[in-house]
Amino acid sequence: MNKIEKMIKELCPNGVEWKKLGEVLQYEQPTKYIVKNTDYIDNGIPVLTAGKTFILGYTNENNYYPATKDNPVILFDDFTTAFKWIDFNFKVKSSAVKLLTLIDNKNYIFKYIYYAMQSIHYATLEHSRQWIEKYSNIQIPIPPLAVQAEIVKILDNFTELTAELTAELTAELTARKKQYEYYRDKLLSFDNILKRGGVIKKLGEIGRISMCKRIFKNETQDSGEIPFYKIGTFGKKADAFISKKLFEEYKIKYPYPKKGYVLLSASGTIGRCIIFNGEDSYYQDSNIVWLEHDENIVMNKYLYHFYKVAKWKIDSGGTVSRLYNSNILNTEIPIPPLEVQQEIVDILDKFESMCNSLTEGLPAEIEARKKQYEYYRDKLLSFEHN
């Protein structure tokens, strides 16, 4: 029998009391705390949402909610039922939230109520306000104050340990990325390449720009056989597809990248690049391009690493900044002998692999800690409902 169970047995032998959330929490409408100007600034009073984004930006407007560590508030999204614990001054973007505080702080510990709410498994099935008619009627267990305090102590400690681990892993990842960038920039510098028997050429001297055939909107579907990557999904998950028949026709008639070619973003996130893995897929013309070149002069993998440090001359004259073919072809690249290229690629591949391993491991570790936390939280809050 653990400490909590012993306390429950001694303090409430007849079971734990249950209360509706609306009986322990009061709400305030956020009207006077809504930000007027959504052209956010870099610092000031944070503008919050209860969802994943959390901090939308900052403002210098007054009439903010004066939350503190001694006077916190729960920011509750009235439509999604997402909520956050807030203990600092803030404003909100819209009236779609409610501000929840304790009605009685003599019999309830506010942080305990917050943790109890986290154990509520509630799914909103319609887009409507939830607090008054539904969510506030959900019952939660209310053990004696001593038990509430012990549960809060345990969960606060667990939360702090998780935050510390996340900070340590994030710091390690940042340090590794800076180390990688330092060596990448040094290895690919013009001075270093020239010292190692290299030459300086324009990309247009070693190859030409190619791109896929234009795909029109009416030729795409939301699901299908061949993923079609647009500038917004390049390097991510495709949200459009083309038919196998159209793909096979265009692949034969028009330019198509060879496996290993480096695909480059010429708009949106300019300079983003990926190595084409040869899997059947199609790419948005003019926005996603590649350089067809002699691989006996420049290795694809060397070109991939160079793109990450290239000094692109971006054209910002129109409504959208972009990298035109002429901008790419006129960009200078330092080209060392092939054996030096291979050496540089081997070093940078190792650094990139290390960074990717940490990048992938960080969310996995955080997710594992989150599940562990949720397990113990739900176990601590699993009281019998008489």
Image (cartoon, rainbow, N blue to C red):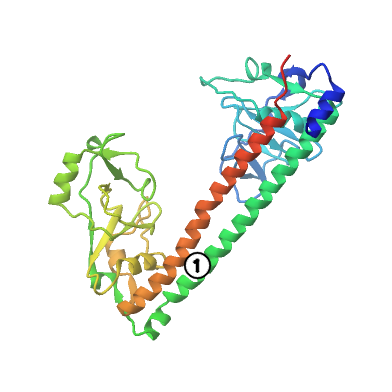
At a point 37% along the width and 83% down the height, the residue shown is 194
Q: Could you say which is closer to the camera, residue 341 or residue 14?
A: 14
Query: On the rendered structure, is 344 left or right of 21?
Result: left
Q: Residue at x 65, y 17 (%)?
A: 132
Tell me the SS state at disc 1.
Answer: helix
Inspect this view and state whether residue 174 appears.
yes
How far across and down, in percent of the image, does residue 19 sit? 75, 18
- Residue 337 picture location, percent across and down: 31, 80
Residue 109 visible to the viewer: no
Q: Residues within 10 Å of mark 1 (few under 14, many from 20)?
A: many
Does residue 375 lie above or below 284 as drawn? above
Q: Which residue is mark 1?
A: 180
- Total numbered badges shown on the rendered structure: 1
Task: Check the image and report above or below for 76 versus 217.
Answer: above
Of residues 181 and 346, the one drawn nearer to the viewer in this rendering: 346
Residue 171 rendering spot, x and y as whole percentages: 61, 59
Q: Amino acid at mark 1?
A: Tyr
Quarter of the image where the N terminus is located: top right
Quadrant where the C terminus sits is top right
**Quick one: 131 or 313, which is closer to the camera?**
131
Q: Would you identify the image quadrant in which residue 51 lies?
A: top right
Which residue is farthest front?
Answer: 1
Image vertical order of residue 263 relative to residue 301, above or below: above
Residue drawn 58% across the image and 43% down it: 368
> Residue 95, located in which quarter of the rendered image?
top right
Image quadrant where residue 70 sits: top right
Position of residue 54 measured from the top left corner of the image (x, y, whole percent): 60, 40
